Image (cartoon, grey):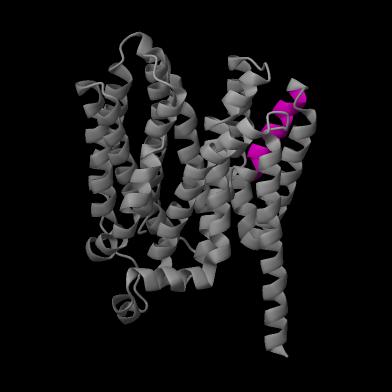
Amino acid sequence: MRNAYSFWILVSIVAVSGFSQGLLLPLIAIIFEQDGLSSSMNGLNAVAIYIGILLVSPFMEAPLRKYGYRPVIMGGGLIVVVALLAFPLWKSFWFWFVLRLLIGIGDNALHFGTQTWITSSSPEAVRGRNISIYGLFFGIGFAAGPLMTSLVKVSESLPFILSGGLCLIAWFTLFQLRNEFPVEENNQAVQQQGLIQRFGSTLKYAWVAFLPPLGYGFLESSLNGSFPIYGLRQDIGVSEVSILLTGFALGGIVFQIPLGMLSDKFGRKYTLLTVMLLGTVCFGTAALTEQHYIALLICLFAAGMLLGSTFSLGISYMTDLTPRHLLPTGNLLCSITFSIGSLGGPYLSGVFIEKMPDVSFFLIMTVIFAGLFTTLLLHAVFTKHTIAAGQH
């Protein structure tokens, strides 16, 4: 990236994208709930965005390499704007499903382009900080989105129109950017390899870095999609559940940049191991203290503080491990693994709640992140021994 001004335009675009995503989840859920739609059908409509992300992922890399960053970001942003403004045209379950699918496609293009641009152009010394700012701006936008849901009392169309208008204003700022292309240090190798081969090569270098985005996708979608159901069954009020989720989100927002800077100083591997271990402890403690509301709020804030940065830390770690000509593929795999986690989270945690009603919801989070920590630790130990053996 040629200058700081371009960087701030990109992270601002990401904030607006986060805002639209954060708005749509509760807004459409509320509208469908008021119309008497079942919770299962409501949930099915919500996963459309992640299905869109997965559907388009295999086709994202080629246009990025051919046309550069800006056209891909602008194309994705335009799809999001058109889809948002189309919601008021016709209230239908399947029409809105298709629109959310399109938003998933557009958001994937937008995030893939901005993410790859930032990771490719950031010096290693500040890479963690830059990616954490990226995560911070998305988090702020995502947290602010639900604030507009109250406008549905004025008009069902108003939140969609305002959100679409905001995205359109942000989209016009992209014309100020000068287009750039991914650095192809080994262009011949890229051309000779097919998509599956590039996936294989990238996984060989950086498979461990895709585990944090996978875990974060599972965590975020489970907390937002399944925890409210569990909380209500545990006689926690709707407003109290909202405060708990806000506490988790605030923890992630406040500590994005400090953790990014710590990862620049001490290394992504050790930072991830530390936050994974302490985050697991937080969820284990939450499982034991969930009957005490203040203790639970503290545990979730601390879990957000530690684990809210795992997606951005995973991207930075992937960038450290991956050759530059494979960075677009690496960023694509980060999006795919995050989406897989996001799709699986509500379903698996929902099954857990149904099948084990007497067991704490937070136990599944404890088990998931304990498993991720153990895998990262074994990888760190194994690679350390491998390097030591090679030196001898």
Which residue lies at the image location 29% right of the left edge and 58% below the top edge?
59
**Left of 36 or right of it: where is 77?**
left
Which residue lies at the image location 72% right of the left edge and 70% below the top edge?
381
Q: Nearer the viewer, residue 264 or 29?
A: 29
Taking the magenta stretch, the answer to whether it contains residue 271 is no
Q: Nearer the viewer, residue 176 or 11?
A: 11
Which residue lies at the image location 70% right of the left edge and 27% below the top edge?
297
* Residue lying at the far bottom of the rendered structure: 392
Q: Quadrant of residue 326?
A: bottom left
Which residue lies at the image location 33% right of the left edge and 66% below the top edge?
182
Quadrant (top left/top right/bottom left/bottom right) for the C terminus: bottom right
Residue 290 in the image: x percent, y percent?
A: 75, 27
Secondary structure character of the magenta stretch overall = helix
Q: Quadrant of residue 376?
A: bottom right
Residue 321 in the image: x percent, y percent?
A: 53, 69
Q: Which stretch did the figure color magenta?
A: 294-306
Q: Nearer the viewer, residue 126 or 228?
A: 228
Quadrant (top left/top right/bottom left/bottom right) for the N terminus: bottom left
**Left of 391 or right of it: where is 154?**
left
Q: Nearer the viewer, residue 238 or 185?
A: 238
Residue 276 in the image: x percent, y percent?
A: 68, 50
